[in-house]
Image (cartoon, rainbow, N blue to C red):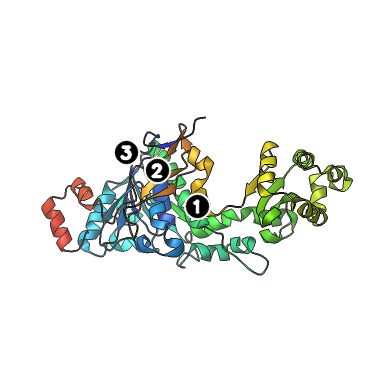
C-alpha cells in the first residue's frame, strides 16, 4: 500500500450529488462533511448573520473549520418569505437535504420532508436530532446531556464522579450515522426511484455506544463498573508511570502476548508462576500482579519500553496531547492532515492543519477541495444557478432576504 496521500485526485463517488444542509454546531455539519468529502456538492444554508459556531471560543473554536470543509455557503433569512422561497428552490434541485433544528422548525418554512417531497419525490431528507420520535423528542439535547442520561459519563468517570468523554463523540458519530443512512437511502433510490426520510439522534447514538455494557449486565447479571474502576478483560491493560514520571499505556491481551511480555522484560519468575498461567488467572490475580509490574517498570523509560514493545509486536501507546499530533510521523507520512484556510476570527485567512476522514478510497485519503467557506461566500453564484438574475439578487439583498 502506498502512502495514501490526501490529494485532489482521490475518488469522488458522490460527485454530481447536491446536498443542501440547514445545520449548525457539530452533528449536522459532520453529516454534510462526510458527504462533501466523498465528492458531493454540499450547500450550507446559514443565517444572514452567519453560523454562530464561526465565533465560538474555547472548546468550540475548532467546530466550524473542522466540520465545514468542502462546502459552499449561502446566507438566507428563512423568516423572510423571499429567503424561505430561495431555500425551497435550492431544495427542489437537491438530492439530499439535512437539518438539525428543533422538531417543527423546518415545517414553519415549508422545508420539512412532507412539504419538499411533494414536489421532489427523489429527495432524501436527513433529520439529525437530540432524540428519535418519542417521549423525549421535544427535550433540548446536547452531547453532554445524552452522555449523562445515557450511561457514558457514568462509565467514563470514577465512581460518584460522572465525566463526559473528551470530545464530541455523540455529535460526531450521530452525524456519521446520518450520512450512513443517507448513503443507504441513495442505494435504495437507485432501485426504486424514490427518496425517503432518514433520522439520526444523539441519545440513541449514545445508547448504541454503551450497548456492550448493557449486554454485559444482561449476560453476567453484574452491573458494569465505571471504566476507571472496571474489572478488565485483560490483566495487563493499563497506564504505567515509569522513569522520570512519564506515562505509557502497555498491554498483553493473550497468553501468547503474556509470554512475549515476560520474555522481553526478563520476567521469567512471573511467567513460571502458576497463578498467572492464563489470562483469566491473571485477571483474578490483578490486584497482586499490577503492583509488581508497576514497581519493576518504574525503572524503565517510556522510550525504552516503547522500543521494546514495538520490536516484539506488543500493544503500547505514548500518552499524547491533541496538539502533539500535528507532528505525528505516521499522520504526516500518510497524508492524514491537510491544510485549510481559517474563515473567521483573528486568524482569518491563515492556514491550519485539519484531520481527514479516517478512510482511503483507491489508496487515497479524501482531501480538501474547498476551504471552509466565508459566510455567504457562494450566495450569488448559487442564486444564479437557480435562475435568479443579478437584478433579482440585488433586490433580495436590499430586502435582507439574502447576504
Residue closest to the eye, 72 or 258: 258
Q: CA distance from mark 3 to mark 2?
A: 13 Å
Residue extending furthest toward the left? 391
Q: Which mark is residue 173?
A: 1
* Crowd tier of the residue under label 1, counting other residues whose Cα lies within 10 Å: few below 14, some 14–19, many 20 or above: many
* Crowd tier of the residue under label 3, counting other residues whose Cα lies within 10 Å: few below 14, some 14–19, many 20 or above: few
Q: Position of residue 140 (x, y in %)?
A: 45, 67
Q: Which mark is residue 37?
A: 2
- Secondary element at tag 3: loop
* Residue 197 seen: no
- Pick whichever of labels 2 and 1 is earlier in the sequence: 2
* Crowd tier of the residue under label 2, counting other residues whose Cα lies within 10 Å: few below 14, some 14–19, many 20 or above: many
- Secondary element at tag 2: helix
- Secondary element at tag 1: helix
Q: CA distance from mark 2 to mark 1?
A: 16 Å
Q: Which mark is residue 47?
A: none
Q: Residue at x 23, y 55 (%)?
A: 86
Of badges 3 and 2, nearer the viewer stands: 2
Query: If the image is split into quadrants, where does the C terminus sit?
Result: bottom left
Residue extending furthest toward the top? 1
- Pick whichever of labels 3 and 1 is earlier in the sequence: 3
Q: Which residue is mark 3?
A: 16
Q: Position of residue 349 (x, y in %)?
A: 31, 53
Q: CA distance from mark 3 to mark 1?
A: 25 Å
Amino acid at each position: 500500500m502506498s502512502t495514501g496521500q490526501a490529494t485532489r485526485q482521490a475518488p469522488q463517488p458522490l460527485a454530481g450529488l447536491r446536498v443542501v444542509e440547514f445545520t449548525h454546531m457539530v452533528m449536522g455539519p459532520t453529516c454534510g462533511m462526510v458527504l462533501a468529502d466523498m465528492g458531493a456538492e454540499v450547500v450550507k444554508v446559514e443565517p444572514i448573520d452567519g453560523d454562530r459556531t464561526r465565533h465560538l471560543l474555547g472548546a468550540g473554536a475548532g467546530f466550524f473549520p473542522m466540520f465545514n470543509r468542502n462546502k459552499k455557503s449561502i446566507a438566507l433569512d428563512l423568516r423572510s418569505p423571499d429567503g424561505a422561497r430561495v431555500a425551497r428552490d435550492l431544495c427542489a434541485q437537491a438530492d439530499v437535504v439535512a437539518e438539525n433544528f428543533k422538531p417543527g422548525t423546518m415545517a414553519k418554512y415549508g422545508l420539512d420532508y412532507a412539504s419538499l417531497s411533494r414536489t421532489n419525490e427523489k429527495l432524501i431528507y436527513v433529520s439529525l436530532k437530540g432524540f428519535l420520535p418519542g417521549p423525549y423528542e421535544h427535550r433540548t439535547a446536547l452531547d453532554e446531556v445524552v452522555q449523562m442520561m445515557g450511561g457514558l459519563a457514568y462509565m467514563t468517570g470514577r465512581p460518584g464522579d460522572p465525566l463526559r468523554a473528551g470530545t464530541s463523540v455523540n455529535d460526531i458519530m450521530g452525524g456519521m450515522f446520518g450520512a450512513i443512512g443517507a448513503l443507504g437511502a441513495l442505494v435504495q433510490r437507485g432501485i426504486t426511484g424514490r427518496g425517503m426520510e432518514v433520522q439520526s439522534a444523539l441519545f440513541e447514538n449514545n445508547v448504541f455506544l454503551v450497548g456492550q455494557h448493557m449486554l454485559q449486565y444482561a449476560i453476567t447479571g453484574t452491573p458494569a463498573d465505571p471504566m476507571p474502576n472496571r474489572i478488565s478483560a485483560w490483566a495487563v491493560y493499563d497506564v504505567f508511570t515509569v522513569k522520570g514520571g512519564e506515562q505509557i499505556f502497555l498491554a498483553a491481551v493473550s497468553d501468547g502476548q503474556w509470554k512475549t511480555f515476560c520474555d522481553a522484560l526478563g520476567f521469567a519468575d512471573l511467567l513460571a508462576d502458576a497463578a498467572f498461567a492464563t489470562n483469566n488467572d491473571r485477571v483474578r490475580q490483578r490486584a497482586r500482579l499490577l503492583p509488581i509490574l508497576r514497581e519493576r517498570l518504574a525503572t524503565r523509560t517510556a522510550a525504552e519500553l516503547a522500543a521494546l514493545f514495538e520490536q516484539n509486536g506488543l500493544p503500547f501507546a505514548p500518552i499524547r496531547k491533541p496538539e502533539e499530533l500535528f507532528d505525528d510521523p505516521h499522520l504526516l507520512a500518510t497524508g492524514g492532515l491537510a491544510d485549510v484556510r481559517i474563515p473567521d476570527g483573528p486568524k482569518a485567512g491563515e492556514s491550519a492543519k485539519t484531520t481527514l476522514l479516517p478512510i482511503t478510497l483507491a489508496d487515497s485519503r479524501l482531501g480538501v477541495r474547498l476551504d471552509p467557506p466565508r459566510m455567504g461566500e457562494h450566495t450569488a453564484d448559487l442564486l444564479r444557478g437557480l435562475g435568479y438574475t443579478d437584478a433579482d439578487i440585488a433586490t433580495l439583498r436590499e430586502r435582507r432576504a439574502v447576504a
